Amino acid sequence: MRPSFLQMYDCLRKKGPAHVRSSKGTQYSVEAAITEKGNREGERVIIARPSSGQVRIHQDCWGENITCQGTRAGGIYNGPYSIWDWYRENCN
């Protein structure tokens, strides 16, 4: 069973950042944070950072290949060392 957003968020806060790899070989550093500005200020967010830029994943789009902002996020879920693998090794 895959963890909920809150389970992942809590584990990333305690044991992160996670380092995962997509099916295309992109490396991501993944951490938990609180949104500091904008219309989601004060909300929990999981941030995945490839070599440049970032992908912000909120609770209502957790596990989806596209974020609420329309950014591709599937890389952290679908690689040979995904966020699910990291969770299983670090949080169970």
Image (cartoon, grey):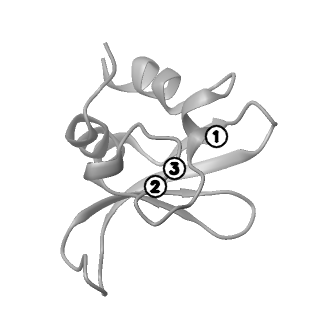
Q: Which residue was labeled with disc 1?
A: 75
Q: Residue at x 48, y 48 (%)?
A: 17
Q: Residue 64 in the image: state x and y as whole percent.
A: 44, 40
The quarter in which the C terminus is drawn is top left
Dot 3 falls on a residue whose secondary structure is loop
Q: CA distance from mark 2 to mark 1?
A: 12 Å
Give the left or right position of residue 13, taking residue 82 as reference: left
Dot 1 falls on a residue whose secondary structure is helix
- In this orientation, which residue lies closer to the viewer: 21 or 18? 21
Q: Which residue was labeled with disc 3?
A: 66
- In this orientation, which residue lies closer to the viewer: 57 or 13? 57
Residue at the extreme bottom: 37
Q: Which residue was labeled with disc 2?
A: 67
Q: Residue at x 45, y 66 (%)?
A: 69
**Residue type at mark 1?**
Gly
Counting residues from the start of the chain, the first of labels 3 and 1 encountered is 3
**Residue type at mark 3?**
Ile
The quarter in which the N terminus is drawn is top left
Q: Residue at x 27, y 41 (%)?
A: 5
Which of the 4 quarters of the picture holds residue 41? bottom left
Q: Which mark is residue 14?
A: none
Judge whether 58 appears above or below 40 on screen.
above
How crowded pointer 3 is (Cα within 10 Å; few <14, some 14-19, many 20+) is rated as: some
Observer-side mark, 3 or 1, equals 3
**Residue type at mark 2?**
Thr
Dot 2 falls on a residue whose secondary structure is loop
